[in-house]
Amino acid sequence: MNIENRIAQCVGLWLAEGDQNTKREITFTNNQFMLIKYFHKTLKKIFVFKNNPRVYIYSPYKAYKLDFLLDDTVFRYYVDKRANKPYFVYRVSGRYLVQEWLELIKKTVVREDFYVNILRGLFAGEGNVKYIEKSKARVLRIAQGKQNQLIEKILNHLKIKYSYSSSERAYVISGKENLTKMMKIKVSYLHPEKHQKFVHMYHTYKEEHYPRGQLKNLILKTIEDRPKTSSELSKIFNRDQSRITKVLIDLKNMGKVKNYRARSLTYWTANKNIIIISDRKNSILSLLKIPKRTSDVSKLMKVDPKSSFKRLKELKKLNLVERDGRGLWHKIQTNHQIIVA
């Protein structure tokens, strides 16, 4: 994803769960550390920090510790007995930094081509999924203390019908047509828990019969931005995995998709600029910043030479490495985007 779209998503995250009153620091709160990391990494790409960012971790139990941290970031741990689960507060200070951030937000929210990504951020922060199995009630909500002009502009632009509930203090979106539109724009994908709930709720609709060729087109659009396994596509389209696999093979024979094997899973993509590799192959690529023999790679990876040679040959097929006449393996520069699965 390009940096402008990442910024738009972070603008949505901040509008949902950022402190909009302070003029001295950018603040963002969420219970998903991956979103804190995403927010931090995006800001680092566009700003120069004069002060180290801080992350405050609040947990209902004292023993909670993060397994990994962020570079150049100060971490502080606190107990909050009112919390149901850990949550994180990200802060980076700087008066001029805040001014630049607010100016960037003003430029972002007026551009309609950023509306989808802003909505994704807003939903990751303030969205929730409500499914009542008995009544088959299916609802998406975006919490807001009062009506929000930007949210209404975005939903109107996307032709998604909604209502604002004063009692629930939230925008309410229901009906299969509207939920289908929300699913197509991947409104929930930034937040793993909400995304899982939304996908589960959406798949409770009875299976539809697609017109001839439509399923192929829908699958192509779905795997254009982010690779998927046949199992994931099966859940998205409420079809047997064997049926999805047959469609994918047909698309591959037509030259419209590619598949890659990583960690015993097969990933499919319609983006020809993407190469998907396992974390082990990625580790080997990192080692080959300096050319090495197969035996060197096997020692550093702590695996037998046959296994290393097999991985290196697989990387060679992907045009990511080559072997010279002295038996040294070299990493090849590529214009493709490498995704580690």
Image (cartoon, helix red, strand yellow):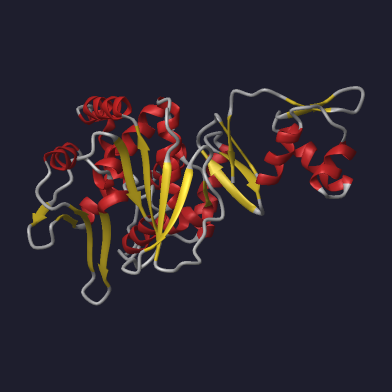
Quadrant into which the N terminus falls: top left
Against 237, is 221 above or below? above
In this orientation, which residue lies closer to the viewer: 326 or 260?
326
| Percent of width and height locating residue 158 | 20, 39
In this orientation, which residue lies closer to the viewer: 56 or 176?
56
| Percent of width and height locating residue 255 | 56, 33
Residue extending furthest toward the left: 166
| Percent of width and height locating residue 275 | 60, 35
Residue extending furthest toward the right: 326
State the image quarter where residue 279 is shown. top right
Q: Residue at x 22, y 61 (%)?
A: 139
Against 327, is 82 above or below? below
State the image quarter where residue 78 is shown. bottom left
In the shown orientation, is residue 227 left or right of residue 299? left
Residue 216 at least partly seen = no
Residue extending furthest toward the bottom: 134
Against 82, is 156 above or below? above
Q: Residue at x 30, y 63 (%)?
A: 205
Q: Residue at x 35, y 52 (%)?
A: 30
Residue 137 at least partly seen = yes
Q: How many marks?
A: 0
| Percent of width and height locating residue 265 | 62, 53
In this orientation, which residue lies closer to the viewer: 76 or 229?
76
